[in-house]
Amino acid sequence: WREKMWSRSTVVPALKRGYASSASSAGHSQAAHPKGKGLLSFEQFASLAASGEIETLIVGFTDLTGRTFGKRYDAEFVAKIGPEKFESHACEYLLTVDSDMKILQGFKAASWHTGYGDFTLRPVMSTLRHASWLNRTAHVLCDVLHPKTHEPLAHAPRSVLLRQANKAAAMGVNALCASELEYFLYNNTFRDAWQKGFDHLEPAGWVMEDYHTLQGTRTEDFHSAFRHHLKASGIPVETTKGEYGCGQHETNVEYSGIMDMADRHVIYKQMGKEIAEAQGKSITFMAKPHTDQSGSSCHIHMSLVDKDGRNVFQGDQDYYNIMSTDTFRHFMGGWIKYTPDVMPFFAPTINSYKRYQSASWAPTRLAWSPDNRTAGFRVVGSGPSLRIECRIPGADANPYLAFAGSLAAGIEGIREKIEPPAAFQGDIYAAQALPAVPPTLHDAAHCFRNSSFARRAFGDDVVEHYAHFYEMEVAAFNGAVTDWERK
C-alpha cells in the first residue's frame, strides 16, 4: 500500500460515493448522480437497455456468509418502472441458511412458524454498474428492508454496517476503508473440485509465489481479465501479485468510503469466481484451504476523516514516532480491546481459526506495532495517509460484518477514551504473555453472545441472530466425521 494511494486528492469524491445515510442508501434520489468509469446513472442504464447494449440487470444482496443472492431482471422492464418505484423481493429464509443452503431453525426473524415471507430489496443506485465480465449485463446491490416498515432489516449484513456508518457520521466523521483480499486459484473447474471432494486439486502455481513475477505471468490470463473487468465495472484497481502459497494471489483495489468499499468487496468476490468459471478454473476465499501453506487474509485498513476530508488520525502528538491524535489512539484502543467481542465477524467459520498459526503471516496476538507484520494491528502511513491495518480477518469474512465490527469497536474506543497497550517491538509470535485471539469459533461465538459491547453496538436481535448462526455451525461440525478421524 503506497502512501500516495491513501492520501490522494480523490479522497472526498470517493467518500461521497462510498458513504450513504440510511435515507440515501436506498438510492431513489440518486438516479442522476455523477458516475465514474463503469458505474451507471439510471438514465444511462435505461439508454443502454433501450439500445440493447444491456439486456439483463442482476439485483443482489448478501447472505450472512457474504455470498451474493438475488434475481436477474429484463433490463427494459426495470427501465420502464423507473428508479423511484423499482424494488424487488426475496424469501426471508435466505438470511438463515448455511453454506450448503440448509435452512437452519431457531431464528426469531424467520422460521416455519413465521411462514417464511418476503423481505424487500431496494436497489442502492450508487452501486449500479456495468457488469463487464458478463454479457450485456448490469448489476446493482440492494438494501434489505422490512416488508411492512421499509426500514433496513437489522440483521441483514449491509444494514449492520450502515448502522455503524451512521453512528460515525453523527460524531462528525466518516470512515475510509480498504480490504486486501487473498485467494487460491486452481486449474480445476468448480464442478471438478466438487466431484473431487475439494481434495487433490491442481493449484495454478507449484512454488511459493510471493512477489514472483514469473509465476504471475503464468496466471496472467486470469489476472489481466480480473484487473480489466474490475476497472471496467467501476472498481478502480491497483495491483495483482503472487502470495506466499502455491497458486495464492492478492488483488488490491483502491480504498474508498466504508459502504462503497464493502460493496466493492462483494462485487470483487463474485467477479473473481465468475471469471474463473468462464476460464475453466476455480478460486477460493477459504481462510485456510491447505494445512501446509499460508492461509488467505482480508487485512482491513481504516482511517477517519472529517466533513472536509481531513484525516482525524493525523496530528501533532508524537506517539511512538507516529504524529497522531487522541482520536487515533482511542480508535485503535477500542479496536484492539473489542476484537474478541466481534471475532466471529472477522473469522466466521470453523476453518477460519486454522489460519492463526505461529510464523504463518497471520496474527495470533492482540497487539499493535508500527509496520510489523507479526502484529494483529499494524500502523502504516503518515500524515494524510496515516491508518490502522487490522490483520486478523480472513478472506472468508463477510465485508459488511467485518467492517461493522471494526468501526463499532473503534467508535467505542473514542467514546470510552480507551488507551491502546504499549507498542510491541519484535516478534509478537514469541510473546506468550500477550493476549491471544480466540482459538475457535466456539469460543468466539460465546464471547460475542455474552458481550455487552456487541449488544450496545448492534442490538440484541442482531447479536442473537448471528450468535445462533455461528453456534449452529459449531454444532454441525461437532457432529461431522472428518478426514482426520478416517485417516
Image (cartoon, rainbow, N blue to C red):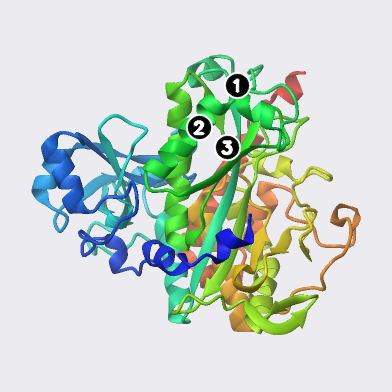
Q: Earlier in the sequence, mark 3 or mark 1?
A: 1
Left or right of residue 304: residue 135: left
Tag in front: 2 or 3: 2
Q: Which residue is mark 2?
A: 224
Q: Quadrant of residue 12?
A: bottom left
Q: Secondary structure at mark 1?
A: loop
Q: Where is residue 253 shown, x and y percent of the image? A: 52, 49
- Residue 9 in sight: yes
> Do the residues under discs 2 and 3 have CB atoms within 8 angstroms?
no
- Rendered view: 31 above or below 217: below
Q: Earlier in the sequence, mark 2 or mark 3?
A: 2
Cα–Cα gap, marks 1 and 2:
26 Å
Cα–Cα gap, marks 2 and 3:
19 Å
Q: Earlier in the sequence, mark 1 or mark 2?
A: 1
Amino acid under disc 1: Phe
> What is the quadrant of the C terminus in the image?
top right
Q: Secondary structure at mark 3?
A: loop
Left or right of residue 239: residue 417: right
Tag in front: 3 or 1: 3
Q: Residue at x 33, y 31 (%)?
A: 134
Left or right of residue 114: residue 201: right
At label 3, counting other C-alpha atoms closer than 10 Å, the crowd grade (few under 14, some 14-19, many 20 or more) is: many
